[in-house]
Image (cartoon, rainbow, N blue to C red):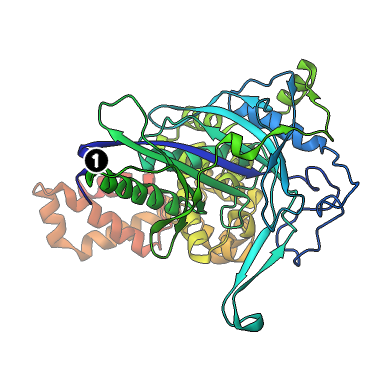
Amino acid sequence: MSNYKDKYEMVIGLEVHAQLKTNTKIFAREGCEFGKDPNTETSTVTLGLPGVLPVLNKECVNMAILVGLALNSKIPNRCKFDRKQYFYPDLPKGYQISQFDEPICEGGWVEISNKKIGITRAHLEEDAGKLVHAGASGLYGSSYSLVDLNRAGTPLLEIVSEPDMRTAEEAREYVENLRNILKYIGVCDGNLEEGSMRADANVSIRPIGQKEFGTRAEIKNVNSFRSLTRAIEYEFERQAEILEEGGEVIQETRLWDDNSGTTSSMRGKEDAHDYRYFPEPDLMPLEISKEWVEEIRAKMPELPSQKLERYKKQGLSDYDASVIVNQIDMALYYDKLLAKGVDAKTASNFLMGEVAAFLKEEKISIEQSKLTVDNFASLLELLKKGTISNNIAKSLIVDILKTGEDAQSLVEKKGLSVISDESTILPIIQKIINDNPEQVAAYKGGKDKLFGFFVGQAMKETKGRANPQMLNKLLKTELEK
């Protein structure tokens, strides 16, 4: 790594495109499910045939308002749609319906660990299709491209940040937190690999202490958190080297190549006038009443930040609470578990330990495992009552994850209930003391740490079933005789 960071500061703004989880497209009635056969989710509207008219999907508006409220944005009482003029083979109309000067959401912020990242705006628009490029072995021995229009017309909400980030790590945390918010409120699945959430990074650099921004480059084709940080770091180095050599950074759109770890020029960066925006003549401006906004606000689920604070108040550490909150399936499962009245910290320890390790090894989510909420709660209740020890519970939960067998039945079948009978434990202790005279003498001579040795021997004899409190009490009494 170079020493450029001692001389230059990064300035980063992000444009995140979130695909909304609607059943149909934003202006047409066909579905928008990922993975369908090419060109099977199309219609006359998607194909841009003459004489067809777009019809706005109200659910897209509801979701956009919900996002705006979650991001602390202002929801204006009026927004409108515009035509953004450009031609690509995967955009049959030759223009995209988007929002320009009157978006549905204005302002707001997303909080990261050390500050708030401002939101400039969020606006609704339709997605373009997808080009599949083939190699030179194709038709007539030359390269060619195939067009899949299934994605064309899919509803997007583009969330534009202020240029408030100064490191690649801040950019990553911003996208992670934004993704969590969108998933928690149920408007986007946040799947970067499938393209349902995509981030374009605007990166510029300036000498440390300078107020004016440098010339930015927009980086596209970033489809993972790792790629985002790598692309930003590479672009910082590229721009710094240009300035160090006396050159000028040009405003352009660059493409990230994950294999080579580099960006390459894609096209000159367009400004608003290049797109020749004008109001969409086939869609009326949209009036959004305060009553409509409040109706959506009333449906707002608990946000990640609120859930995090609740978990901490219930006794979880910052780290444990963050790990659970950042896995929405785990958090929803955990909430169902808490509703059963289990101890929050005990349940968290098992989720973060044995359960997480099993899920990672099997590469499944907790919902895909055989550990039902009821069965998990039953296991924790057996532990709370002292019917089983903590070590036995750890062993049993792995069995339940694999088989789904009832916790109580497993305890009975395997004979794993805790031994709390003094007449059973005492003879075992006496035998261990008789069999280890040297250790007994050393313990009585002041080596208190040997107490753990005797506990271990007793647990070994009882296969971990001895009641720990009773065992410690009896053992101490016998050793002091």
Asked if one can make out residue 196 in the rendered structure from this viewpoint, the answer is yes
Asked if one can make out residue 340 in the rendered structure from this viewpoint, the answer is no
- The correct choice, above or below, for 417 with respect to 298 in the image is below
Position in image of residue 53 (x %, y %): 88, 42
Image position of 216 (left or right of 397): left
- Depth check: give the residue in front, 51 or 59: 51
Q: Quadrant of residue 287?
A: top right
* Residue designated by label 1: 5
Name the residue: 84% across, 49% down. 45
Position in image of residue 130 (x %, y %): 66, 59
Image position of 352 (left or right of 68): left
- Residue lying farthest right? 51
Position in image of residue 31 (x %, y %): 81, 53
- Depth check: give the residue in front, 55 or 429: 55
Identify the secondary structure beneath mark 1: helix
Image position of 243 (left or right of 251): left
- Depth check: give the residue in front, 122 or 432: 122
- Residue lying farthest left? 445
- Residue lying farthest top? 290
- The correct choice, above or below, for 423 with respect to 252 in the image is below
What amino acid type is highlighted by mark number 1? Lys
Image position of 470 (left or right of 327): left
Name the residue: 40% across, 51% down. 231
- The correct choice, above or below, for 14 with respect to 245 in the image is above
Position in image of residue 472 (x %, y %): 31, 47
Label 1: how many residues lie within 10 Å, few (<14), some (14-19) or many (20+)? some
Name the residue: 35% across, 64% down. 461
Name the residue: 87% across, 53% down. 44
